[in-house]
Image: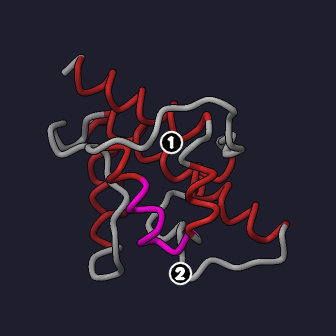
Amino acid sequence: MQIKLIAACILGLLSGCAGQGVLVSGDPSLPTGDPRQERLVFSECAIYFAAVQTLRADGRRPSGNPTRGCPPKAAARPADINPMVSVPSVSPGFPQELYSRMIARGVPSDLADDIARSKAFWDLVALRDSVISGF
């Protein structure tokens, strides 16, 4: 029952975003309703909420609505989007897809560049990789 409820919530969030740009989604290789999908969505959305908060603190605004389709509870999840000193470059595959989604959702490129060098970004990449490899 709980898995069906989670699946309904995730599908509702995703369908509510249809036609509004890039969706926040877990991974298509995971079955619908898989709780790992929720973890991926919450982690990605936490990055978007942190980006909006950073922009506001700097007196800036996103060019779109980065948090559209995100569960409001994801705003409470901490996301360290400060750039780290030494990180890998954004590589093809999921890291590039995530970077492109940030830009498509309205995160300015200078902030997206910083986020792509952050702990939150690479933690999400690692989470996704561990979820997929464990599937």
Is residue 134 found left or right of 29 in the rendered image?
right
Which residue bears the numbered disc 1? Answer: 43
Please indicate, yes or no, whether residue 78 appears anywhere in the rendered image: no
Residue beneath the point at 25% across and 43% down = 27
Is 100 one of the magenta-colored residues?
yes
Frontmost residue, 111 versus 66: 111
| Number of residues whose C-alpha sits closer than 10 Å to that of mark 1, classed few (under 14), some (14–19) or many (20 or more) | many
Query: Which residue range is magenta in the image?
Result: 99-107
Which residue bears the numbered disc 2? Answer: 64
Quadrant of the drawing holding the N terminus: top left
Give the secondary structure at mark 1. helix
The quadrant where residue 135 appears: top left
Residue beneath the point at 66% across and 45% down = 81
Colouring scheme applied when the structure was drawn? secondary structure
Residue beneath the point at 50% across and 34% down = 122
Disc 2 residue type?
Gly
| Number of residues whose C-alpha sits closer than 10 Å to that of mark 2, classed few (under 14), some (14–19) or many (20 or more) | some
